[in-house]
Image: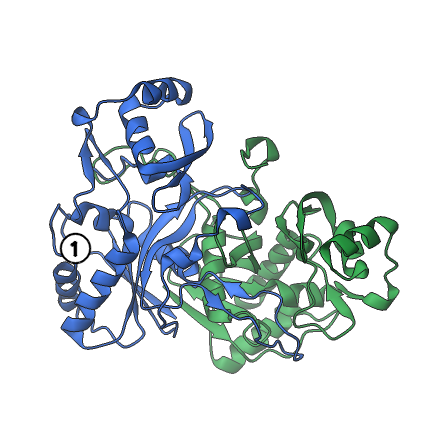
Chain colours: A blue, B green
């Protein structure tokens, strides 16, 4: 397995065609995608290309956002965006609000983020990242005539452990959740671990190459595995009633 | 970044010298470790080499284990081992007991596992995996004269999302938790994500190469990154009082 980062993309703006931009960057580096390659795209450039930057001056915080802003010591306009992006608030503390986003992700601040965006703006998560992944995959496949996978990688914190790990918020053309029920171990016994979060593991792997100031290396090509399939990142979202921690 | 799996190790037994076995396997493949290489070792072979296999016939379940076994539909002898390995029970359900282990990990069944072990036996987690990682690192470094890192990789489930991801239960010679507080983004603003769980991300990456029936490829060499440092996997364990989900 090999992961190749691309550091030669321009700054992405609203309306940019990521398929065009990724293929140009690959061409410039002399990299030809192969069958089963997986293209990891950082969430930030997808959000930017899809116009998910918000001008904070235009956000009018609700009363609820003002109260919650005081409680969390966060800018009430940011809190307003978090509330708009969320289905449910799970936990609140100094400088964080952990929510379930409208897309179903459990994360801090609904993914509303001011890193790597111009001052006075905030970035929201892509509205439907599985759809974004599919569009990018289809676009690249059409250009190059190979079957590839695409993941849209973000970094989330988690319970029980410090530090962020990679999370695939979007995926297309891969076995995002690898179901191994029925597979046998070395001694012919059925495996106790039955489902592997392949898309999240790949996002973590890609993050190691992309770093955190991800606009410098917003794309990573994962090569040498075969996880082609028809999964989506949505498959990884645990149903609330199947979650003992909710 | 490149990850090279080793599939040429013998079945590991109690008392085996992993340093010796890993260096022979590397030599056989013609792979020379370089400075900053990270050797990922699957937890299973560490546990086996350290004699952490238990003969189930010799386990006498306590009354508590019998009751909990009935409730979870688990073998009471397995439950007995889980209780012995645990500090606290967090959640219980059909066929699972989520605990905090004596080492401080939150995981299902305290890592007591019957996959890839002979019938009638169960495998416990290494007693002190950071120490195991350090011993393997020191041993390999002495043999080869390079500075490397070692992680001991396991697979855990997690709240909110389906599927297992890689978890470093042991680490040595690497920046296990990468503290980026104060680092700046592309626009000179301080990063909002401040700590990256490097060791867990690397474990997830290695797992993609090792697969799940991990004794076939129990070792993976991660090359091309520079995360050398003095971290431990213990650094990744969130303190209970800093965990809003406990």
Residue visible at 27% across and 35% down in the picture: A114
Q: Secondary structure at mark 1?
A: loop
Depicted A35 relative to depicted B108: above or below = below
- In screen coordinates, is B75 left or right of A112? right
Q: Residue furthest front?
A: A241
Of residues A146 and B34, the one drawn nearer to the viewer in this rendering:
A146
The picture quadrant where one finds residue A231 is bottom left
Q: Quadrant of the C terminus of chain B?
A: top right
Question: Picture quarter containing residue B75?
Answer: bottom right
> Residue B83 vs residue A209: left or right?
right
Q: Residue B204, relative to residue A2: is it above or below? A: above
Q: Chain of mark 1?
A: A
Residue B159's spot in the image, x, y percent? 53, 48
Q: Residues within 10 Å of mark 1 (few under 14, many from 20)?
A: some
Residue situated in front as seen by the camera: A224 or A167: A167
Viewport quadrant of the N terminus of chain B: bottom left
Question: Taking the image as drawn, is residue B230 in sight?
Answer: no
**Vertical arrangement, residue B17 with respect to residue A244, above or below:** below
* Residue name at image x 74 percent, y 54 percent: B82
Q: How many marks?
A: 1
B98 with respect to A221 (left or right):
right
Task: Name the residue that disc number 1 marks.
Answer: A9
| Residue drawn 33% across the image and 60% down it | A171
User: Would residue A80 be visible to someone looking at this image?
Assistant: yes
Q: Position of residue A51 (x, y in %)?
A: 16, 44
Residue A219 found in image quarter: bottom left
Q: Position of residue A107 (x, y in %)?
A: 41, 41
Residue A79: x %, y % from top left:
32, 27
Instruction: State left or right for residue A72 relative to residue B129.
Output: left
């Amino acid at each position: 397995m090999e992961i190749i980062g691309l550091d030669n993309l321009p700054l992405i703006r609203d309306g940019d065609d990521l398929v065009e931009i990724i293929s140009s960057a690959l061409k410039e580096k002399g990299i030809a995608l192969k069958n089963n390659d997986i293209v990891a795209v950082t969430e930030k450039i997808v959000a930017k290309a899809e116009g998910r930057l918000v001008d904070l001056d235009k956000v009018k915080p609700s009363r609820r956002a003002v109260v919650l802003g005081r409680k969390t010591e966060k800018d009430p306009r940011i809190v307003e965006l978090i509330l708009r992006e969320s289905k449910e608030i799970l936990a609140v503390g100094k400088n964080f609000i952990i929510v379930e986003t409208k897309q179903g992700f459990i994360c801090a601040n609904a993914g509303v983020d001011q890193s790597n965006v111009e001052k006075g703006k905030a970035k929201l998560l892509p509205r439907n990242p599985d759809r974004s992944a599919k569009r990018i995959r289809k676009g690249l496949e059409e250009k190059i005539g190979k079957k590839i996978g695409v993941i849209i990688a973000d970094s989330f914190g988690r319970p029980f452990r410090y530090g962020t790990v990679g999370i695939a918020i979007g995926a297309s053309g891969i076995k995002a959740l690898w179901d191994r029920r029925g597979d046998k171990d070395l001694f012919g016994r059925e495996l106790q671990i039955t489902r592997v979060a392949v898309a999240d593991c790949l996002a973590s792997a890609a993050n190691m190459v992309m770093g955190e100031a991800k606009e410098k290396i917003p794309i990573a090509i994962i090569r040498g595995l075969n996880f082609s399939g028809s999964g989506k990142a949505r498959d990884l979202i645990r149903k609330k009633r199947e979650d003992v921690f909710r």
